[in-house]
Amino acid sequence: MDTTGRDPSSNDASHNPFQAPRSRVADPIPENSGVLLEKPNRNDAGRGWTWLSEGWGLFKEAPGTWIGIVVVMLLLGIVLNLIPFVNLLFSLAYPVLFGGLMLGCRSLEQGQGLAFGHLFAGFQSRFATLLLVGLLYLLGSAVIGFGVFAVALGASGAVGFLSGTPPEAPDLMVLLLAVLVMMALLVPVMMAVWFAPALVVFHDKGALEAMGLSFRGCLRNIMPFLVYGIAGMVLGFLATIPLALGWLILMPVFIGSTYKAYKDIFIA
């Protein structure tokens, strides 16, 4: 007992200002993952493989939930693609679903765990902006595809094909060249949409601004993305061998690696 007749061991922080609090309520997860850089970082080539290995680390945190999410995504894609015109909805919804999964990756990284509901979290967080990203991606892909198709077959042939009148069979080499040109032209579109969902949900960016930032981030990291792409193709081949079941693991790894790459490139 002290001179006041109180037991010192019973004092709490309100009686002793120098005593540290015994417990603390966890802070809520911040809306942003960090400070967004004005200019995207440029990483060395080896980071491409590191992103994949870090994506594997996120997968190991919740493998069962990840596989369940991938199964639902695949089933949704199959069902929607069987319905004419409705299959376009999946392309529109891709950034919305991906934005939710970026939130799931952040939750895993901060020790909050991954929930199945993260797959649909984008419908509650910046839904309209994410949907606009999907619309712009779809429009850009359609313009490129139709443009290359029209050049390869001739404008009349392309219109005839779309209207149900089969055009004359084009030369195989012309078709092959058209496919290669279309793939090359689609690369910038993919670069613009790659990190856009993360930039929208974490930093409240508009669709065009997010896509512009995503494009610049990819452009400044061509070498790591080259390594990333080569390694991804090899892993994709291996994942396809056992009845494509390896994709149940590889898809979450790709999702997690995208989150890790976003942090490397855009966060201070």
Image: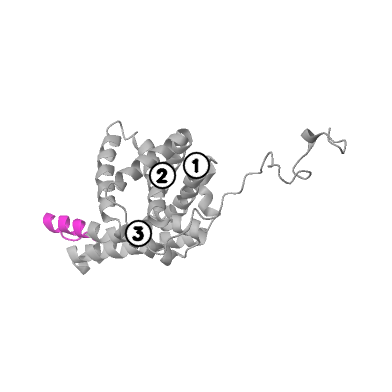
Residue that numbered label 3 is attached to:
217
Task: Give the image location of residue 248, x and y in percent.
Answer: 38, 36
Q: Is residue 96 visible?
A: yes
Mark 1 or 3, nearer chain start: 1
Q: Residues within 10 Å of mark 2 (few under 14, many from 20)?
A: many
Number of the label disc, if any, that sits on residue 108: 1
Marks counted in the figure total 3
The three-letter code of the residue at mark 3 reads Gly
The three-letter code of the residue at mark 1 reads Leu
The answer to whether the residues at label 2 and label 1 have Cβ atoms under 8 Å apart is yes
- Residue at screen point 28% across, 59% down: 186
Residue that numbered label 2 is attached to:
256
Task: Give the image location of residue 46, x and y in percent.
Answer: 28, 46
Magenta range is 164-181
Q: CA distance from mark 2 to mark 1?
A: 10 Å
Left or right, 141 with respect to 68, comes to: left
Q: Nearer the viewer, residue 178 or 215?
A: 215
Q: CA distance from mark 2 to mark 3?
A: 17 Å
Q: Nearer the viewer, residue 255 or 92?
A: 255
Q: CA distance from mark 1 to mark 3?
A: 24 Å
Left or right, 127 with respect to 158, comes to: right
